[in-house]
Image: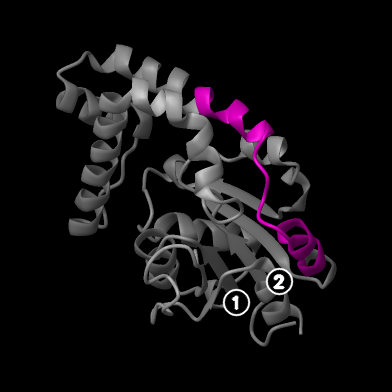
Amino acid sequence: MREGIKGVAFDLDGTLYPNYSLNIRLLPFILKEARLLAAFGKAREIMRNEQKENPSRLYDDFYRQQAEITAEILSAEPRLLQEKIDRLIYRGWEPFFKKIKLYKNAVQTLSAMKNAGYKLGLLSDFPPEIKLGYLGILGFWDAVLCSEAYGALKPHPLSFVKLAQVMSLPPENILYVGNSHPYDIAGANLAGMKTAWIRNPALPGSGRRKPAADFSFSSYRQLHDFMLS
């Protein structure tokens, strides 16, 4: 086992599978609901910025408050918009995961780490359980958490700390793997975890190592060798 690491935790979207494989399937929806998606994304950034300025700010009714901010942007009725967001985005996107393929060697790497004695965790900003079932990897995890359940989006450290508690490990004994430097790597660092950044070699500048991550890789074979060699 890698010295000091007893658990490995992962982000889901863009980390265990490439983002483009979902975006391609969502293209008709993206074109049809561009205004809703833009407002939804802006609302989540407002929530992140509020929590960055005031880390004690938690959303005790996350989905209602998210809908209220989105509704204000769209001049819409919050209750009806919350129902629409749940129907179109939260529940509406999940069936697409039946046809999405994980990154090459991701399953083999998860299996090898599990067999080597590492605890495995997963923390996503969006509810992950149904997606994991469709992806065929629901049974790997010692802990599966959604940051929204704690009223705090990444990079707020609260959900990372909760993940460590559920995994029954100190944060410093966990390596968190993610594709987003400002959300995954920054949030895990704030919680005291070690970090691994999966980069996309097809994107300009992505080959440069991010200094805040302890390890960067572009294939799951590299992560496998890093953790198990």
Q: Amino acid at mark 2?
A: Arg
- Taking depth in this image into account, of 4 and 16 the one nearest to the observer is 16
Residue 70: percent from left, percent from top: 24, 28
Q: Secondary structure at mark 1?
A: helix
Q: CA distance from mark 2 to mark 1?
A: 22 Å
Residue 29 coordinates in the image, percent (x, y): 42, 24
Question: What residue does disc 2 label?
Answer: 221
Task: Between residue 104 and residue 127, name the one nearer to us.
Answer: 104
Image coordinates for residue 204, horizontal then vertical, percent: 38, 67
Residues shaded magenta: 91-113
In the displayed structure, 218 sits above or below 31; it is below
Q: Quadrant of residue 76?
A: top left
Mark 1 lies on residue: 173
Q: Residues within 10 Å of mark 2 (few under 14, many from 20)?
A: some
Q: Earlier in the sequence, mark 2 or mark 1?
A: 1
Q: From the image, which quarter does the C terminus lie in?
A: bottom right
Whole-percent x, y for residue 106 in the image? 71, 59
Q: Is residue 111 magenta?
A: yes
